[in-house]
Image (cartoon, rainbow, N blue to C red):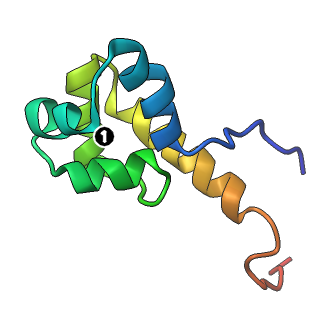
Amino acid sequence: MKRLAVNLRHPGEILKKEYCEPLGISQTELAEKHLGVSRKHINSILNGHDPIYLDLAIRLSRAFKTSPEFWLNLQMEYDIARYNGDAFKVKPVF
């Protein structure tokens, strides 16, 4: 089976390093002014503790003029890379 290139960075790190820091947006400003969520929630995502779910992906897409799929794909690639090892004991069907 051919392995796909995957993103090994948590999407929160990408949000922090490629969006917030270059624009000078603080966690509090992003959370409360732009996204309408708690600073604690954004802090947890930016530090790689929580995933980006659909509702936040939609908010981020509107705030940064991206697509929800962009954020969800980053999360999916991260999750696949994280769990692609021997995390699950599965007996193949075929």
Comparing 31 with 52, the one in front is: 31
Label 1 SS:
helix
Identified by mark 1, the residue type is: Ala
Q: Residue at x 73, y 80 (%)?
A: 88
Q: In which quarter of the image is residue 8?
A: top right
Tell me the quarter of the picture where residue 63 sits: top left
Q: Nearer the viewer, residue 76 or 35?
A: 35
Residue designated by label 1: 57
Up the image or down, 48 lies above or below 30; here it is below
Residue at left 81%, top 66%?
Answer: 85
Up the image or down, 65 lies above or below 85; here it is: above
Disc 1 residue crowd, few under 14, some 14–19, many 20+, Cα 10 Å = many
35 displayed left or right of 4: left
Where 88 falls versus 57 (above or below)?
below
Whether residue 52 appears in this view of the structure is no
Residue at position x 32%, y 17% from top? 24
**Position of 22 compared to 6: left or right?**
left
* 21 or 82: nearer the viewer: 21
What is the x, y in percent for residue 72? 43, 42
Which x, y percent locates residue 6? 71, 40
Residue found farthest to the right:
1
In this view, the residue in front, 93 or 87, is 87
- For the C terminus, the quadrant is bottom right
Q: Is residue 90 visible?
A: yes
Q: How many marks?
A: 1
User: Left of 76 or right of it: where is 43?
Assistant: left
Spot occupied by residue 62 in the image (x, y as percentages of width and height): 20, 25
